[in-house]
Image (tube, helix red, strand yellow):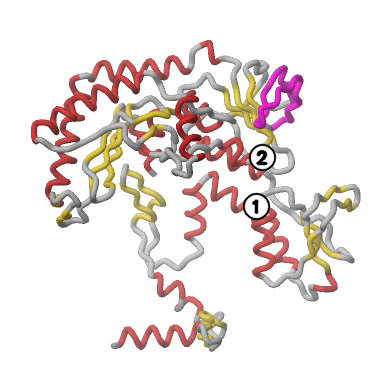
Amino acid sequence: MLFRSILEWKPQFLLDSHEMGAMDTYLFNPPRAPFNPFLPKTIYKWWDNIAKDQAAAFDEYGWSYYTRDWNEEVYPGYGSSWGIYIGLVGILYEQSGADGSIVKKEDGTSTTYRETVHHQFISSMANLTTIANHREELLQDYYDSRKKAVSAKNTGKAFVFSSESNTSRLDALAETLKRQTIEIYKNKKELKLPKATTSTGDQVTRQNIPAGSLIVPMNQPLNLLINNILSFDIRLDTKSMEKERKKLMKDQGSTLYDVTAWSLSHAYGTESYYTEVMPKIPMIPYKSDRKEGKLIGKNPKYGWAIKSNDDQFYHILARLLENGVKIWCAEETFNVEDEFFPRGSVIIRNNANQGLDKGLLKKLAFDTKTREASNLDQISFWNEEAKKLSWFDQWTKTLEWNIPFAKWFVGGKINASYNTLDVHQTSIAKKPAIIWEGENGATRTITYARSEEHTSELQSQ
């Protein structure tokens, strides 16, 4: 992934080179207002320096270009935009497309594919020249941005997330942050936040935070990125918003090109707080504490109940339905042996599921651990999953990652057709492999045995 390469390479300059509509010319930075309020002040200087040299290079050839017109720097999710908030200089250009051939424009001029490549080449060389001529200044700005992020003024500031009932959601948020190398922790004991702001903007005092919550301190190198992706309510400048409102009131459409809402705090829906007076408490690096799922009880007379308050519930629900299990959804909360079940929990009645395989329920209960392994240690997870397939030659290395190239199961030899057909001929040959239904209602079922015969017939032709 792009962000992983950026984090490993730690570049100071990143170019996002695009194509746009064929009737256009050429766009490059600086962008126009509105601007993301968390943009570092140094980025404006670099946009101007780079654009000045790029414009001079285009002027040598008499080429058309423009800046600022429609491109704004608001949403932090684009490749070059995301990189700005970890300290590098990110820029964008957009070349009118030629689709690999020649385009005749409305003004009577033509653009060839060769010309578009030439434009991109000259732009890149101009940018590299600018960066080389300002190398020391660029490195100093990169260093200063990270030094400023860990300064004393950010000590005590933190985002805090808790979710006692839905630990899967908290773990998912934690993994999203960890993938971006953001430092995250958890509190070993319950704590009280003296003052804090909730995700809805309310001010609270002496807020209880349960043990095991997710804590993101702000005095760390990726401070700007954290602010950008976790802040509850990012406001754009008033002048730009007045212009936007006037256009909308006149039914002229939006002036904005970018996405304008992206807070992960809202997206994950956890209980979220921001504080500038984080108590000094013992913390440890965040790691999931999710335990293995299990069946409670051996042979219940009525049936089984599954709580609906954790995201894993929906995975289990889907698997139950796939296996033909009949379930009932509770419209109200209820208690079983002092255990609380929220609204939306499901009941599996014994009398409606005669012959239900208890092993299936046990497997689904343990499925939480399987998913956790997939999320937290992908290499180990896929190494174990791959062992379930039939290989002609065993792999020697699960993942070989040499940016930007990735090789999975190095040295292994496998055949997809063999794993989908041949291996099933001794076990489930007579079972359906394909169930086809046409638009006219006609159906056809093809077994694994017949599928293998069809494949062999094609190979012999």
| Residue at the image point whose x is 48% and y is 16% from the top | 150
Q: Quadrant of the C terminus?
A: bottom left
Mark 1: amino acid:
Thr
Q: Secondary structure at mark 2?
A: loop
Is residue 207 covered in magenta? Answer: yes
Mark nearer the N terminus (2 vs 1): 2
| Residue at the image point whose x is 54% and y is 50% from the top | 374
Q: Quadrant of the N terminus?
A: top left
Note whether 198 is above or below 338 in the view shown.
above
Q: What x and y, as percent, mark residue 131?
A: 22, 24
Q: What x and y, as percent, mark residue 24?
A: 24, 45
Near-viewer residue (57 or 109): 109
Residue 402 left/right relative to 169? left
Is residue 388 covered in magenta? Answer: no
Q: Secondary structure at mark 1?
A: helix
Residue 256 left/right relative to 428? left
- Count of picture labels: 2
Near-viewer residue (262 or 257): 257
| Residue at the image point whose x is 44% and y is 43% from the top | 252
Label 2 Cα neighbours within 10 Å, binned few <14 / some 14-19 / many ≥20: few
Mark 2: amino acid:
Asp
Q: What x and y, as percent, mark residue 349?
A: 83, 67
Residue behind mark 1: 368
Residue behind mark 2: 289
Please report contact status of discs 2 and 1: CB closer than 8 Å, yes or no.
no
Q: Which stretch did the figure color magenta?
A: 190-212
Label 1 Cα neighbours within 10 Å, binned few <14 / some 14-19 / many ≥20: many
Near-viewer residue (261 or 157): 261
Q: What x and y, as percent, mark residue 291?
A: 69, 45
Note whether 322 is above or below 125 in the view shown.
below
| Residue at the image point whose x is 31% and y is 32% from the top | 68
